[in-house]
Image (cartoon, rainbow, N blue to C red):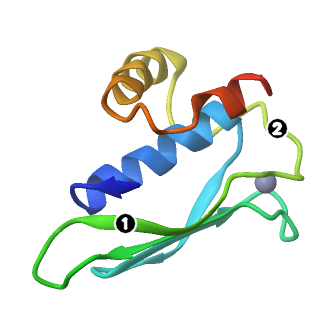
Amino acid sequence: MQFANKDELKEAIREYAIVQGRNVKLVRNDNKRIQAKCAGHTKCPFILFASKIDKDEQTFTIKTLSLEHECTRVDKLKYTNSMWLSKRFADKIRKNPEWDVGAFQSET
Ligand SMILES: [Zn+2]
């Protein structure tokens, strides 16, 4: 899975976290690498690691991805409101059909 630039990747991480109902924190966030972990539970297996394909390009590709959570859903997410979510997320699904929607829809 690839993203045109770092902002697009971060947006996708945020949206995924909202849909899953979990707070995700970026433990690494520099010009070459992005690493996200679950903020809810230290032992939670959720991890996302992405890096730049080439230093001269903006494209990020996901190297490691484990979307499983062992923590419980949180009611209050720090991100944003549900109106913003439904609007932005529907848009993202259309653009990224390979983003695994089924997996988390069954969970909600
Ligand atoms: Zn978790």
Q: Which residue is pictured at 71% across the width and 44% down the height?
A: 22
| Residue 3 drawn above or below residue 37 | above
Choose top left, top right, bottom left or bottom right for residue 103: top right
Name the disc covering residue 80, or none: none
Label 1 environment density (alpha carbons within 10 Å; few <14, some 14–19, many ≥20): many
Choose top left, top right, bottom left or bottom right for residue 34: bottom left
Q: How many marks?
A: 2
Q: Which residue is pictured at 59% across the width and 62% down the height?
A: 25
Q: Which residue is pictured at 47% across the width and 24% down the height?
A: 85
Residue 29: percent from the left, percent from the top? 41, 75
Residue 105: percent from the left, percent from the top? 69, 23
Q: Report the quarter where the C terminus lies.
A: top right
* Left or right placement of residue 49 versus residue 71 in this view: left
Q: Which residue is mark 1?
A: 61
Judged from the image, the secondary structure of the residue bearing numbered disc 2 is loop
Q: Report the quarter where the N terminus lies.
A: bottom left
Residue 94 showing in the rendered view: yes
Residue 76: percent from the left, percent from the top? 71, 34
Q: Which residue is mark 2?
A: 73
Q: Which residue is pictured at 42% across the width and 27% down the height?
A: 93
Where ligand 1 lies, by image quadrant? bottom right
Judged from the image, the secondary structure of the residue bearing numbered disc 1 is strand
Closer to the N terminus: mark 2 or mark 1?
1
Q: Is residue 96 or residue 31 the one in the foreground?
A: 96
Query: Furthest-left residue in view?
Result: 56
Residue type beneath disc 1: Thr
Which label lies toward us, 2 or 1? 1
